[in-house]
Image: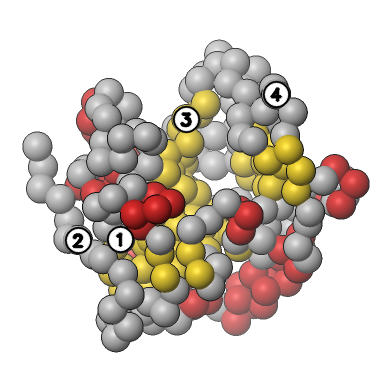
Amino acid sequence: MASTANNNQLTRAEVDSYVENGCLGPYAAMTPAQMTPIREAIDTNVLNSAGPNPRRPMQSRHMDQPEVYDLASHPAIIDRIAGLLGPDLVVWTTNFWLKDPGAAEIPWHQDINFWPIEPPVNISAWIAIDAVTVENSCLRIIPGSHRQSVPHTRATEDMAIHEMADPNAYDLSQAVNMELKPGEFCLFSERLLHASSKNTSDKRRLGLAIRVTVPFVHIFQDTHLHPGHTAILAKGVDVMGFNRYAGRPSSA
């Protein structure tokens, strides 16, 4: 059940739960009705345009779309992450995860294996743009799996990404389905094992992953993301000066 708290501050019990399980949620950033015009803007302006990254049109759309920038820096998300990482926060990248009917399985994996940040400090917020259910391939997580590094191997050809966690290194009986209404989100660690099944329904599934770190982390923009990549200084100040930032993009 989504949290109905009147503010975005985490309780000590929630912080302890995150430390124990590597995940929190779901929480509501907005209602499904409030998400409707945002989804329409994303359908028009994101899914039908190239975006700033020439290799990955679903990545870094906070750089050119104000609705995505607003989602990525939403207080319901950022203020809760501040309860875990502190008052100075950087959204270092965003990525839409679209699964049309029939889209392939994303195997179990830990994100830390893929990311261009050093040191690898991160909390991800995954916010539902569409209704996300078991039927249309919701996020699946294994609470507590962040407490160990799991070896990864080459994924099979039928998978959507090229690496997967060694199937002998985790217990699938502990897996939890993270169903979300439009506007709801969950939080999880860079080491939490997660996956999603093949979309066997007739409904699309679209979510936005928002990756949040702290100013002392170096983001390798040019070599691993794309030249010109900029982050969002989402909360507080950056006294380090390692990374590039840009403000909210203007509407087209």
Q: Are marks 1 and 2 in contact (CB under 8 Å)?
A: yes
Residue matched to label 2: 246
Helix, strand or loop at label 1? It is loop
Whichever of labels 4 and 1 marks the residue nearer the N terminus, that label is 4
Whichever of labels 1 and 2 marks the residue nearer the N terminus, that label is 1
Whichever of labels 4 and 3 marks the residue nearer the N terminus, that label is 3
Up-down relation of residue 163 to residue 101 (above or below):
below
Whichever of labels 3 and 1 marks the residue nearer the N terminus, that label is 3
Neighbours of disc 1 within 10 Å: few (<14), some (14-19), many (20+): many
- Distance from disc 4 to disc 2, alpha carbons, whole Å, reads 38 Å
- Distance from disc 3 to disc 1, alpha carbons, whole Å, reads 22 Å
Question: In this rendering, which labeled residue sits more in front, label 4 or label 1?
Answer: 4
Neighbours of disc 4 within 10 Å: few (<14), some (14-19), many (20+): few
- Distance from disc 4 to disc 1, alpha carbons, whole Å, reads 33 Å
Residue matched to label 4: 157
Question: In this rendering, which labeled residue sits more in front, label 4 or label 2?
Answer: 4
Neighbours of disc 3 within 10 Å: few (<14), some (14-19), many (20+): some
Question: In this rendering, which labeled residue sits more in front, label 3 or label 1?
Answer: 1
Location of residue 206 in the rendering, given as x and y in whole percent from the top left corner: 46, 32
Q: Which mark is residue 249?
A: none
